Image: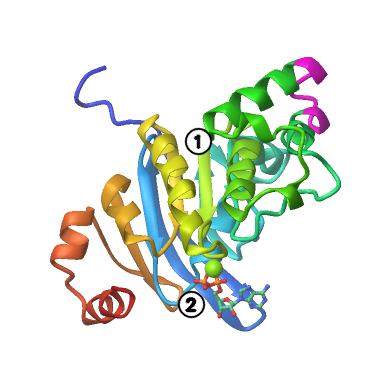
Amino acid sequence: MTMAQSKQLAVEMRGVSKFFGAFQALKAIDLTVETGERIVICGPSGSGKSTLIRTINQLETIQSGTITVDGIELTAGGDNVGKVRREVGMVFQQFNLFPHLTVLQNCMLAPLKTGRANKSSAEATARKYLERVKIPEQADKFPAQLSGGQQQRVAIARALCMEPRIMLFDEPTSALDPEMVKEVLDTMIDLAREGMTMLCVTHEMEFARAVADRVIFMEAGAIIEQGAPEEFFGNPRSERLRNFLGQIA
Ligand code: ADP
Ligand code: MG
């Protein structure tokens, strides 16, 4: 590879606007994410963070602009939405595990349903990722028998079982008791160090400092400021970001 060749873009958003009725939740967002890049998104409640990352796997449709994920143009229609969803894993604040399925069954469900794997390969993949998130011994338990931190690690393993190329996290530690935050962040740090492309909405600034290539600050549906963690935290340019950082510190 020569210096002139740029890396393939994982996500390319151009002029993306999202309306809920008359209310504009995203205001002509431009955002490009390189393959392997780790992005942290922060900002006040209601600023559009969840909406932004949910447009990437089409959990939210958009009204104008274009989104390309791994070279697949989302807005072009056809089967592209299905293709993109297979490449993008998502982890939510509420773990959204199926309560009537065991941990192993939760992890096997999507690969089986989408025809990605047969039973034995789905099980092997599930066990591999439960090992990766360090809870292989919980495979046969039901979600309610696990702590919140363990449930969130299952949710991460379940997303990884689809072998996604991009992972989206929407405040994955916000619903956890404080003593369980670290085990989930450590799992995310491992994933980041393995080179996964990640977009994480979080206010865990230690996490941002540890792994983010870029931190993005949103307010009122727009990206107000972004930069490498050192610059972002050490030398915030806008008054609004300074105020925000003051509040969450
Ligand atoms: P954040 O994740 O930064 O807290 P959201 O992306 O969830 O913000 O929401 C951005 C704005 O869009 C908020 O004002 C919210 O009330 C509004 N919003 C989000 N989802 C919907 C919806 N389904 N219907 C109407 N308004 C919504
Ligand atoms: Mg949100």
Does residue 32 show up? yes
Q: Is residue 77 above or below residue 132?
A: below
Task: State the CA–CA distance, disc 1 to disc 2.
Answer: 29 Å
Question: Is the shortest distance between ligand 1 and the CB of mark 1 under 8 Å?
Answer: no
Closer to us: mark 1 or mark 2? 2
Q: Image quarter for residue 24?
A: bottom right
Magenta stretch holds residue 130: no
39 and 28: which one is in front?
39
Residue at (79, 39) in percent of width and height = 102
168 and 51: which one is in front?
168
Marking on residue 170:
none
136 and 190: which one is in front?
136
Helix, strand or loop at mark 1:
loop
Ligand 2: give its quadrant: bottom right
Instruction: Tell me where the magenta segment starts and ends, as one range.
Output: 112-120
Q: Quadrant of the N terminus?
A: top left
Marking on residue 70:
1
- Kindly identify the amino acid type of the residue bearing the numbered disc 2: Ser
Q: Earlier in the sequence, mark 1 or mark 2?
A: 2
Does residue 213 show up? no
Q: Which residue is mark 2?
A: 45
Residue at (76, 31) in percent of width and height = 108
Q: Is residue 175 left or right of residue 10?
A: right
Q: Position of residue 130 (x, y in %)?
A: 61, 31
- How packed mark 1 is, by other alpha carbons closer than 10 Å (few <14, some 14-19, many 20 or more), is some
- How packed mark 2 is, by other alpha carbons closer than 10 Å (few <14, some 14-19, many 20 or more), is few
Q: Is residue 24 above or below residue 93?
A: below
- Kindly identify the amino acid type of the residue bearing the numbered disc 1: Asp
Question: Is the shortest distance between ligand 1 and the CB of mark 2 under 8 Å?
Answer: yes
Residue extending furthest toward the right: 100
